Amino acid sequence: MRIAQISDTHILALSSELPEAATRAEGLRRCVADINRLDVTPDLVIHTGDTVQTGAVADYEHLADLLRPLKPPIYLTPGNRDDRDNFRTFFRDADGQEPFLHHVFDGFPTRLIALDSIIPGRQKGAFCQDRIQWLDDTLAAEPDRATILFIHHPPFNVGTHYVDGYEDAADQAALAKIVAKHRQVQRLMCGHCHRSSQQLWAESEATTMASVACDLRWGVDAAHLQAVPIYQLHDVAANGKVTTHSRIVPN
C-alpha cells in the first residue's frame, strides 16, 4: 500500500490579495498534479492539518477546488487553523465522534486512524481524557491489525521552534502511554511543525513533514528547495512496516 501525505497547506480564499495566497495555491496544485502522474499511484492521500489559513468558508471552497483533480481518495485531519464546522461541511469522509473529528479508515490492508488534536482558537494541541478513551477503545477493537495513526500536533518536541506543543504536558504523556500499550501501531504521522523529522516514540516510529506552504517551512536550507513543493510518500508493507521518503516536486 502506498500513502501520499501532504500537510500545512494553509490555503487562503481565491479572492485573497495577500501575496502568499497565490504561491500556496500553486504549491498545492503542483503537488496534486505530481501525485496524479506518479508511476505507482498512491492508494490514498492523507492531509495532516492546517488545510486552510483562516477557517473561513471561502478558504475551504478554494481548497476543495484545488483538491478536486486528485485521482486517489483524500482523507483529512484537522489542524489548529481549521474550523471544525466548516471542515465537516466540506470534508466529512466518514462518521466522526462528536465533538471531535476522529476517523477510522478500514478499507485498506493496514488500518488507518486520523486523530483530532485541536482546541478551537488555540495554537497548541490537546488530547484529553475523552480522546484518550476513544483511541484506547478503537485500538483495542483490532489488536492484531497493523495500524498507522495520523495527527496534526506532534506529541513530542521537534527542534527548538516546536517544544511542549500541547496545552497540558500530561496529554502528551497519556497519548504516548496508550500508543505504547497497543503494539500494533507501526507509525504516527504528524504535521504542524512545518519541517521533516523522525524519531522513536512510544515504541513506534513518529514522523513529521515539511509544510506544502513554502513560505512557512522550517529546516530547508538549500536555496533551490526553499520554494519547491515537497510532500511525503509512505510505502506500507504487508506487515504494516513503513518506508518513507520526501518527494520534491519537479518543475
Image (cartoon, rainbow, N blue to C red):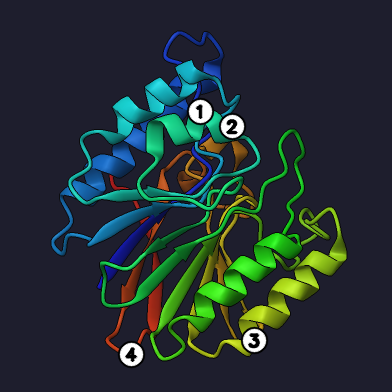
Instruction: Name the residue that disc number 1 marks.
Output: 86
Instruction: Name the residue that disc number 3 marks.
Output: 180
Say few, some or many: other residues with alpha carbon within 10 Å of mark 2 (under 14 / 14 to 19 / 20 or more): many
Image quarter (top left, top right, bottom left or bottom right) of the N terminus: bottom left
- Mark 2 belongs to which amino acid? Asp
Q: Are marks 2 and 1 in contact (CB under 8 Å)?
A: yes
Q: How far apart are marks 3 and 4 (CA)?
A: 18 Å
* Residue 109 pos. (x, y %): 26, 77
Task: Determine whether the residue tagged by mark 2 lies in a helix, strand or loop.
Answer: loop
Position of residue 24 in the picture relative to residue 40 (left or right): right
Q: Check residue 26 in the rendering and tell me which mark sits there, or answer none.
A: none
* Residue 226 pos. (x, y %): 52, 43
Instruction: Name the residue that disc number 2 marks.
Output: 83
Q: Do the residues labelled 2 and 4 touch (CB within 8 Å)?
A: no
Say few, some or many: other residues with alpha carbon within 10 Å of mark 3 (under 14 / 14 to 19 / 20 or more): some
- Looking at the image, tell me whether mark 3 or mark 4 is earlier in sequence order: 3
Say few, some or many: other residues with alpha carbon within 10 Å of mark 4 (under 14 / 14 to 19 / 20 or more): few
- Mark 3 belongs to which amino acid? Ala
